[in-house]
């Protein structure tokens, strides 16, 4: 029973699972959305350019028919006439083609969130399997797609019928008109037809996209075992990060302990905190925190300081504030300048011999660090 529960997809897809599926091209998308955007682009271009193009086309037709009796049809005149017609047709079609291409890219980008999915174009051999293809043809999704195709046919028929009914009252069918009016009529007819089709396909596209979202969400649902496996992998990554953090802390502590023998002074709590400071005139703008620690690590700092003769000063408030506010490798906080300066002044007067040796010790440590590439 437990194995059966683990095999059933009852859990919502995790963010990681959704992203992986998206990279494989498995996301909600609807071809009808592409069609709607393309139709909208066509209507926009027709509304802006067809009047002028219709007038140009009418003028071209008038010129051809009025000059038809005088027109020479030979190898010299035909290329010029043909070029004029091609240029006019290109002027009419080029804005439509460019706008449709932009609309198609925009529709695809809105459905994908403008994210690139190169793995979706990779060849999958399972898609070449006849069994897989048979399953796709007779699947529930195929039936829904067939229903949407039937709705699209009905929408096209509705657009044609209603568009024709609206255009039958046009003066073109009941009274003499100028030939130039033909362009205006074609514009009105195209806009009327495409607008009705746009409304019908917009509704169908919304239904189709809603179904694709529902289907994709259902297909991406996970079994309990998949959720457990993903959580285990995530926990594994957390364990690796924890190990790396521990290693970084060990390395930092090792570096801090190595710097203690070159400190000017170690301030203590006296038992809970220890902070090692150094100040080199002309090099440091303020005392720098070399090391800090509490409890056991504080005791190690103090032991190492005692071993190398580093002066230690007990000052509870300053030590506590330095431990809380100071950062290793950084200068001390500005509010502590005065207190630390007074402590260093006393240390410099009472431990002159130590600071004479400290110069040599720092020089030796610098040479050693350069020889090992700066790694302690």
Image (cartoon, rainbow, N blue to C red):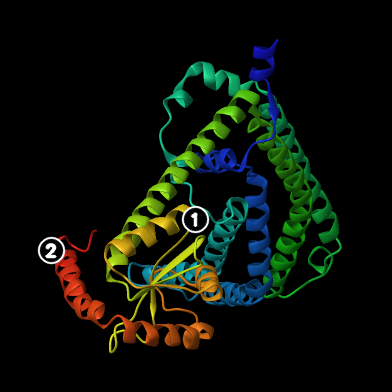
- In the picture, measured across the screen, residue 327 lies left or right of residue 150, that is left
- Reading the chain from its start, which is encountered first: label 1 or label 2? 1
Rendered view: 286 above or below 278: below
Q: Which residue shows up at 64% across the image and 25% down it?
A: 223
Tag 1 secondary structure: helix
According to the picture, the residue beneath numbered tag 1 turns out to be 295
Q: Which residue shows up at 29% across the image and 88% down it?
A: 281
Q: Which residue shows up at 25% across the image and 80% down it?
A: 355
**Nearer to me, 140 or 263:** 263
Q: CA distance from mark 1 to mark 2?
A: 34 Å
**Nearer to me, 123 or 232:** 232
Rendered view: 344 above or below 144: below
**Nearer to me, 148 or 125:** 125
User: What crowding class fits label 2: few (fewer than 14 Cα within 10 Å), some (14-19), or many (20 or more)?
Assistant: few
- In the picture, measured across the screen, residue 263 lies left or right of residue 342, that is left
Q: Which residue shows up at 57% across the image and 65% down it?
A: 99
> In the rendered image, is residue 68 in sight?
no
């Amino acid at each position: 029973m437990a194995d059966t529960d683990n095999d059933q997809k009852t859990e919502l897809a995790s963010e990681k699972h959704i992203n992986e599926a998206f990279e494989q091209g498995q996301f909600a998308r609807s071809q009808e959305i592409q069609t709607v955007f393309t139709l909208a682009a066509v209507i926009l271009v027709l509304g802006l350019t067809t009047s002028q193009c219709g007038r140009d086309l009418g003028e071209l037709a008038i010129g051809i028919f009025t000059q038809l009796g005088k027109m020479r049809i030979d190898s010299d005149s035909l290329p010029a006439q043909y070029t004029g017609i091609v240029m006019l047709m290109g002027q009419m079609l080029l804005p439509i083609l460019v706008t449709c291409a932009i609309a198609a890219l925009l529709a695809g980008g809105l459905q994908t969130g403008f994210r690139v999915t190169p793995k979706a174009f990779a060849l999958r051999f399972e898609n070449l399997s006849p069994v897989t293809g048979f399953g796709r043809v007779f699947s529930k999704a195929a039936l829904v797609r067939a229903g949407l195709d039937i709705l699209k046919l009905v929408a096209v028929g509705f657009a044609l019928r209603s568009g024709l009914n609206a255009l039958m009252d046009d003066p073109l069918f009941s009274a003499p008109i100028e030939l130039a009016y033909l362009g205006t009529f074609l514009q009105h007819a195209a806009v009327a037809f495409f607008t009705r089709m746009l409304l019908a396909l917009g509704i169908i596209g919304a239904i189709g996209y809603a179904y694709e979202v529902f289907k994709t969400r259902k297909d991406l649902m996970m079994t309990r075992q998949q959720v457990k496996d993903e959580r285990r992998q995530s926990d594994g990554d957390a364990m690796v990060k924890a190990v790396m953090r521990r290693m970084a802390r060990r390395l930092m502590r090792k570096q801090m302990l190595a710097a203690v023998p070159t400190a000017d002074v170690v301030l203590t709590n006296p038992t809970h905190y220890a902070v090692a400071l150094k100040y080199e005139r002309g090099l440091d703008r303020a005392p720098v925190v070399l090391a800090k620690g509490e409890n056991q690590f504080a005791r190690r700092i103090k032991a190492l300081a005692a071993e190398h003769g580093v002066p230690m000063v007990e000052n509870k408030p300053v030590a506590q504030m330095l431990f809380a506010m100071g950062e290793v490798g950084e200068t001390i906080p500005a509010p502590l300048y005065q207190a630390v300066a007074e402590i260093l002044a006393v240390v410099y007067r009472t431990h002159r011999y130590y600071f004479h040796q400290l110069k040599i010790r720092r020089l030796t440590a610098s040479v050693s660090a350069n020889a090992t590439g700066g790694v302690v």
